[in-house]
Image (cartoon, rainbow, N blue to C red):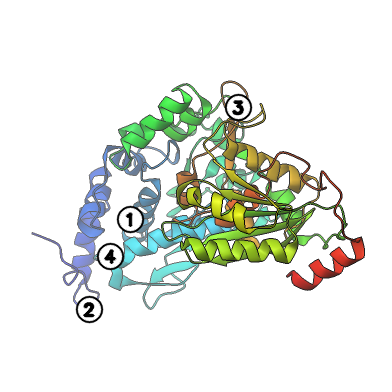
Amino acid sequence: MQITKEMLSPAVMSQDDVAAFVARYGQGPEGIVLFAIEILGLEPDDNQILILQSLFYSDYISISSGRGIGKTYSIAIIALWVLCTRPNAKVLVTSNTADQSKNTLWQPLNKILKASKVADWFQGNSMNIWFKGNPEGPNIQRLIWSEHNVEAVSGYHSTNMIYLCDEASKYPNVVIENLYASCTETWNKMFLFSNPTRNSGYFYDTAEKPAWTFHEIDSRSSKHTDKSKIQELIDENGEDSDVVRVQVLGKFPRLSATNIISDDIVRKSMSAAKPNIKANYVVSIGLDVGGGGDPSVWFIRIGLWCAEIVKLNTEDQETIISKSVQLVEKYKADFLCYDKTGIGHFLGGPLSQRVKQTCQVIGVQKGEASPEQDCVKKRDWIYRRFSDWFKAGGVIGQRPEIRRQLLVTEFFYDINGKIKLILKELIKKELNGQSPDEADAGALSCGYVGDLIHQPFNRKISESTLASDLLESSKW
């Protein structure tokens, strides 16, 4: 008999119906798979079935995987299954940042719930999902913490409680230790999911800890991944490179991945006071050219200061060129560095003809070899220089969108010890499909060879005139 949403309506279900539901879906490893298929309308593949059924063989499960294996859907299935089948259930889902837990966990979980046959059972908001009419009862809770507030993950104790932790490789040890220590009652369980970006820390140690069941999942074995994209990554980097080990094989790297610009530095940059403008400060504009629905973004950098970010939802060449000329003249720019890929390929000639000769127009082909030996490609190089700018004291002001984008922009060292960023497609996935346009434009503002802060030549204008003009025209 086919299960319908109407059959599971709270208005028609009896206590016997509830008992039959729990008996069919809640009693064993086959039940959770049936729940995913019949109630949620999903079709888990072999990897996801392995993850789901691990729940019945261990209390502590660690999943180290390549990208794209469907771990977000696995988390959603487990969360909803526990809530629907365990009495007085408490489900806590979390990730390494609040944005990550909202965009990559909570939103997909709610989408799956709304499309399911039990959608009418529940209510929810941005932090909790509960049975209608019982907000204090069994629930799924979005747990938010930070390394400066690890107490946020302390103090949870309940029977039938489970923690579902995404991006666990990035957690400070104390966070996982606190969660683990709270699992002291009947049917307390814990899942750690992550791409294995670091070769140290609690998540790394679970591969050897006796209490933990550790699974390593290769992206190539998943029905959800694009095998041609995976092969491109392998061909470019080599199967034994750290990039492929982490992004595809689900294996820990020899050298850990890390943010190209640390979050501590970004946060200091956001809260720092506006720097004084000096006459010999370089003025550089980075232009990330829009395409495929993404906006065109200009990042205007004056020495150590991000003076303005401009966004236009356009792919029209004349509009992009006119706005570029306007900003070059407004800020008396020394450099205009634009993304030469895609639509940007056609901008170089018109831009060079229309901007003042005092401004050097540079097309950055991100896939070309880096002009310096420490990076693989120009894309890696401009981001390394952007990192250098932050470390020198660069100030971006209150621009949380840049911080969010940089939090998921990581790099590895390749087999030759050179810096290599993770693929942009992976960054976009972490940003819930959005492109890191502001961060790309900021990196492009560093896309010339030369001093990041000061001009390589003397500007023929007084410091007082320059400062007053720029302060009047800039936003802060």
Tell me, for residue 115, which label it has, or none. Answer: 4
Tell me, for residue 21, which label it has, or none. Answer: none
Identify the residue position indicated by label 2 in the image: 11
Q: Quadrant of residue 232?
A: top left
Please say if the residues under marks 1 and 2 sit with CB atoms less than 8 Å apart: no
Q: Amino acid at mark 4?
A: Ala
- Assign a secondary structure to mark 3: loop
Crowd around label 1: few <14 · some 14–19 · many ≥20 (10 Å): many
Residue 454: x, y in percent?
Answer: 83, 47
Is residue 154 among what the camera can see? no
User: Compared with residue 438, is residue 448 higher up or lower down, i.e. above or below?
Assistant: above
N-terminal label among 3 and 1:
1
In this rendering, would 378 be left or right of 29?
A: right
Identify the residue position indicated by label 3 in the image: 255
Q: CA distance from mark 1 to mark 2?
A: 21 Å
Q: CA distance from mark 4 to mark 3?
A: 42 Å
N-terminal label among 1 and 2:
2
Identify the residue position indicated by label 1 in the image: 81
Residue 235: x, y in percent?
Answer: 41, 25
Q: Amino acid at mark 3?
A: Leu
Frontmost residue, 446 versus 52: 446
Q: CA distance from mark 4 to mark 2?
A: 19 Å
Q: CA distance from mark 2 to mark 3?
A: 57 Å
Q: Amino acid at mark 2?
A: Ala
Q: Amino acid at mark 1?
A: Trp
